Amino acid sequence: MKKIISFFLAIMFVFLCIGCNQQDSVETGKVNVIISKDFGNKELSKKNVDFSKDLSVMEVMEENFKVETAYGGGFINAIDGLKSGFTGVKDKKKKDWFYYVNGILAQVGAEDYYLTPNDFIIWDYHDWDNNIYGSSIIGAYPMNFTNGQEGDLFKTEILHTKEYEKESQEVSTFLKKKGLENIDVKNLKEEGLENIQTNTIVIGTWEEISQIDYLKDFYKNGNKTGLFFRIEKDIQALNSKGNITDEYEKGAVITSMVKEYGVSTSIWLVTGNDEKCIKKAVKLLYETPEKIKGKFSIIVTENEMINIPTNK
């Protein structure tokens, strides 16, 4: 009898272990959503939603917000009453909803994008009359690097000029704590910046990094790549039409852009004309990243943080 009881106890133990392993293997977590307008200048709503397997962006929106759809249900035409200015109206205006997952503008409809735990979705309602094609934003950090796109993770490199080695190591340590394993910190060189299999963070003074040909092309074509700043002597903030709205004697910029149209890897710039402001900007990335949630890009001065493009 003791042998029979021991046998059944052993069987029960095996089944309990199998059950535990199956439960542990189920993906759990949250999906974060921010609803905003005018290129992140006004936050309208935000929610943390429980993740479930095979959850699409459309399902998240329909279950948690009041949405209207168009084009057979695959296109979100309105969120919480704010409607497209172009679809289904006579007096058309080029204003619509655009969504970004982990900082990258989605290339598929909301019903076709399936999420992973802790993905960060940003829906922004803005003007597209200016034909600026900014496809990467900073407001989902650090998910841009730790979650990737549809579960695909990429290597990350932090490239810095000599003054910012300590700060670069701090960013690397922060991202590793958030789960990013494949990350290197190196001195800045031009070689390798164009690698579309790698996310790149460049940290350095504008005087130095602006001499790199690869970055010169992005800056020169800022109206296409989504750069909303200029650095002459001062730092100039631009609106979505590319007009200068504000100027700052000292400051730094955190901005990002995809390396090529249609790819999911991006290049981030943390740069400026003042060492103190640059270090202050980098510090946001490893001490208070919540301050940049939902932002498109930012200018950091001695006294404030400004979302760009500005809404002026």
Image (cartoon, grey):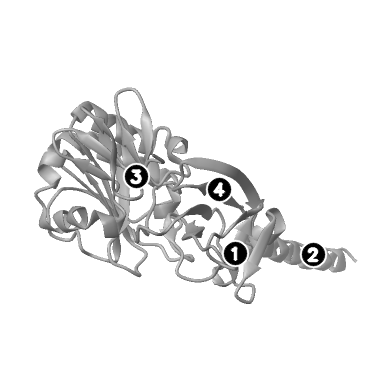
Quick one: label 1 or label 2, which is nearer the N terminus?
A: 2
Q: Quadrant of residue 14?
A: bottom right
Frontmost residue, 116 versus 182: 116
Q: Secondary structure at mark 2?
A: helix
**In the rendered structure, are the residues bearing label 1 and label 4 in contact, judged by CB atoms less than 8 Å apart?**
no
Quick one: label 2 or label 3, which is nearer the N terminus?
A: 2
Mark 1 or mark 2, whichever is nearer to me:
1
Quick one: label 2 or label 4, which is nearer the N terminus?
A: 2
Residue drawn at the location 46% of the way across and 45% of the way down: 40
Quick one: label 1 or label 4, which is nearer the N terminus?
A: 4
Work out how far the residue at label 3 is from the one at label 1, CA to CA, in angstroms: 26 Å
> Label 4: few (<14), some or many (≥20) within 10 Å?
many
Provide the residue designation for mark 2: 12
Whether residue 21 appears in this view of the structure is no
Frontmost residue, 81 versus 156: 81
Provide the residue designation for mark 1: 76
**In the rendered structure, are the residues bearing label 3 and label 1 in contact, judged by CB atoms less than 8 Å apart?**
no
Left or right of 89, for residue 176:
left
Give residue 34's mark: 4
Mark 4 or mark 3, whichever is nearer to me:
3
Frontmost residue, 303 versus 249: 249
Three-letter residue code for mark 2: Met
- Residue placed farthest to the bottom in the image? 72
Provide the residue designation for mark 3: 239
Work out how far the residue at label 1 is from the one at label 4, CA to CA, in angstroms: 15 Å
Work out how far the residue at label 4 is from the one at label 3, CA to CA, in angstroms: 21 Å
Work out how far the residue at label 1 is from the one at label 2, CA to CA, in angstroms: 50 Å
Quick one: label 3 or label 1, which is nearer the N terminus?
A: 1
Q: Is residue 61 positioned above or below 269 on the image? A: below
- On the image, the x and y values in percent for residue 43 come to 54, 41
Whether residue 7 appears in this view of the structure is yes
Residue drawn at the location 19% of the way across and 59% of the way down: 193
